[in-house]
Image (cartoon, rainbow, N blue to C red):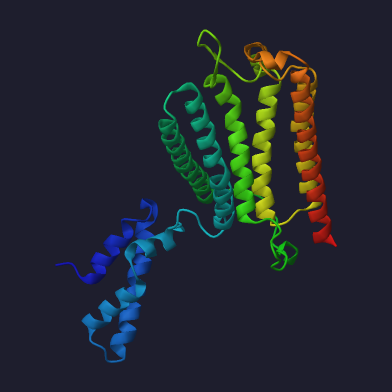
Amino acid sequence: MSSLTDRYLAATLRAVPAPRRAEISSELRAAIEDMIDDRTGAGQDAEAAEREVLTELGQPERLAARYADRRLQLIGPTYYLVWQRVLRLMLATVPGTVGVVVGVLEATVGDDPGRAVGVGITSAFQTAVQIAFWVTLGFAVLERTDTSLNLPEWSVDQLPEGPAERDVRLTDTCASVAMLLLTLAFLPWQHFQPWVSDTDGDRIPLLDPALWSSWLPFLAAVLVASLVLEVAKYRAGRWTWPLVAVNAALDLAFAVPVIVLLLTDRLLNPELVRRFDWLRTDGHLDTVARVTVVVVAAITVWDVAENIVKARRHHA
C-alpha cells in the first residue's frame, strides 16, 4: 500500500507540467522527509508526523499551482477593481437601454402591450448576462496572458471629495427618466398605433410621417442622450457646470427644431389637420402653434435657468 507521502506526491504531480514532474517530485519528497525527520527527532511518532507535515503543506492542487506559477482565480487583484468598475458601469446603462428600445419597438409593431413589456424585460436580462460573460472573459484572458493595460498608478489625488448633501435626488431622477421614456415611446407609438381615425376608419398619425426621414430620428437621439445625462447627473449627485452646459445644449437641440416645425406648419400630420375642420378655420392652427411654442420656450428657459441657479448655489 502506498504511503501518505506517495499519495500526496502523486496528487500534486498530476497538476504540474510533465517536463517538471521529476524535478518537483525529488524536491518535494526531500522537503517532506526533512520536515518529518525534524518532528520525529523531537520525539513525535513517525506516522503522526507525516500526517501533520502533509496537512501543513495543504491541498495538493494549491501546492501544484505554486510550483507551476499558475493562478487559481479567474480574475486576480491586478485587474479585479477595473473589471468591477467596467462591469458595474455597463450593467447600469446598457441592459436598461436595450430593454426599453426593444420594448418600445415591440409595442409599436405589435398589438399586445403586455407582451412588449415581457420582451423588453427578457432582452434586458439577456443583455446583462452577455455583458457579464464577455467582460469577465476578456479580463480573464488579460489575466492569463499577463497583458498590461498601462493603467496609471493610484495617487491621493484620486480620492473622492468628502460626503456632501445631494442636490440631485433619486425621486427627481426617476421622474425625469420616466418622462423622457414616455416621450421617446410616444414618437413611434403615435405613428404605428395612432388613436385618431379619418372618416373611412383609417388611423391617422399625429405627427407628419415625412419627419421620420429627418427630424424625428434626431429628436429621438436627443431624448436618449438626455437619459444618459440623467444617469450621469445622479451619479455626480449635484449640478456641475459641464452638466449644466450639456443639459442646456440638449434642451435647445430638442426645443429649437420643435419650435421651427410648429411655426412652419410641418409638425402635425396634414391628414390630421384636414380631419378636424376647426383647426383649418379662423386661424386656429396658428393659435395652437403659437401657444405651443410659448409653452415649449418657457419650459426650456425655466429648465436652463433653474439648473444654472442650482450649480451656482453649489459652487458658492
Residue sitting farthest toward the left? 1
Q: Residue at horizontal 58%, vertical 36%?
A: 182
In the picture, which quadrant includes the N terminus?
Answer: bottom left
Q: Which of 18 and 123 is in front in this view?
A: 123
Tell me, yes or no, if residue 148 can be seen here: no
Q: In this view, does 230 lie above or below 195?
A: below
Q: In this view, does 225 lie to the left or right of 71?
A: right
Q: Is residue 48 left or right of residue 291?
A: left
Q: Nearer the viewer, residue 25 or 233?
A: 233
Residue sitting farthest toward the top? 200
Q: Residue at horizontal 53%, vertical 46%?
A: 91
Q: In which image quadrant can residue 252 be found?
A: top right
Q: Which of 22 and 79 is in front in this view?
A: 79
Tell me, yes or no, if residue 291 can be seen here: yes
Q: Residue at horizontal 76%, vertical 34%?
A: 296
Q: In this view, does 74 lie above or below 103?
A: below
Q: Residue 269 at what x, y percent from top left?
A: 66, 15
